Amino acid sequence: MSEHRHHQDFADLAAEWDDLVDRCSAATPFQCHAWLDSWWRSYGRPGRLRLVLVRRQGKLVAAAPLMLRLFPLPRLVPIGAGLSDFGDVLLDDDHAAEAAAVLARVLPLNRPWSLLDLREVRPTAAAHRLLPHWQGASRRLPDSLCQSLPGVPVEELLARLPAHSAKRSRAKLRRLAAVGVTARQTPPDEVPAAVADLLRLHELQWRGRGVTPEHLRERFAAHLTRAITAMAAADRAALHRYWLDGELIACHLTVLGPDFTGLYLYGVHPKVRDRLDISGMLLSGCLSYAVSTDRSEVNLLRGTEAYKQRWRPEQAQNERLFIGGRLAVAVYGSAVHLRGAAVRHARARLPWLAEVRNRVRALRTPR
């Protein structure tokens, strides 16, 4: 077991880290080295890294990529928090039980107020295997809802819809073909320029409508450019661009696991948003890509936006997992639970607050 607090130690682990990612069936693209290392370069703070590694006969079999946060109380959170749709630790499938037991024992949580706050933990996440070996307190709370579709040809997906909905969708897809929209996957050497196009179109798409402020910041652009350039070269991400009459109208970034393609971020020019079925265009492209690469799932990632519901996706609930001292888990877990209940109550009873929040966020967004 070893614990590291310097970024260079993590940077030097690239090949060994991704070898472990490939041996951990629960891992997602958000646990690969390129994503986490790039996130740290944009968002990490010196002295806050807490990288816990477990080796078996010199081979890396478990890893917890964590960082220390001090507000509102000291706690460990995963590297990549906030921008990653799934958070997790890594366990070698061939030694998962043994590695989980050791990792649970050596996590730096040996004080009553120590806390590990793991967000966006999938139902199939490796982190769940820590709990049987943890001697302290733990608690689970609901986190984001994620949705998915089978990786099948679009016509097979349409067959799942009511007849009238399927008919409308087929007509919209025929129109896309008729007007001549073309798509191309971006080769790795063109990814930096394509990411710039993606973020430009994303800003245009959301201008005046409450864009996520972080998506417009230079540190996010730097993170995405570094991460996706490396991930595209390793078949862990794909960026597709769409043209109409020779003009770029949309960009779509997907993250890739062995068995799924995940819809992470897209940008579309506002002038075509009302003319064309953008969600149908992007989803059809993802389905085609999933089929052509033998991936069995198209994951819509976090969120319950209306355009996702149209396709009748299956739903899975991420969890927020607390592990630590009994005092910390009791106090912080209860505070998070109460805050979540208050937010849900406000959304149900005072829906106008969401619009106010979006407008405030838009005003605070740098231009």
Image: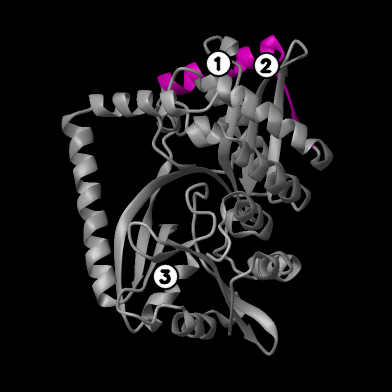
- The residue wearing badge 1 is 172
Label 2 amino acid? Ala
Label 3 amino acid? His
- The residue wearing badge 2 is 177
From the viewer's side, name the closer residue of 327 and 179.
Answer: 327
Q: Quadrant of residue 320?
A: bottom left
Residue 169 is left or right of residue 268, and the answer is: left
Query: Separation of disc 2 and disc 3 at Cα?
Result: 45 Å
Near mark 3 (Cα within 10 A), the count class, few <14, some 14-19 or many ≥20, is some
- The residue wearing badge 3 is 128
The N terminus lies in quadrant: bottom right
Query: Separation of disc 3 and disc 1 at Cα?
Result: 43 Å
Q: Of helix, strand and loop, which mostly describes the magenta segment?
A: helix
Foreground label between 2 and 3 = 3
Residue 14 visible in rendering: yes
Instruction: Please tell me whether residue 206 belongs to the stretch shown in magenta.
Output: no
The C terminus lies in quadrant: top right
Query: Separation of disc 1 and disc 2 at Cα?
Result: 9 Å
Query: Which percent across, then down, holds residue 273?
Result: 54, 15
Label 1 amino acid? Lys
Instruction: Please tell me whether residue 170 belongs to the stretch shown in magenta.
Output: yes
Instruction: Say what secondary structure mark 1 lies in.
Output: helix
Residue 156 visible in rendering: no
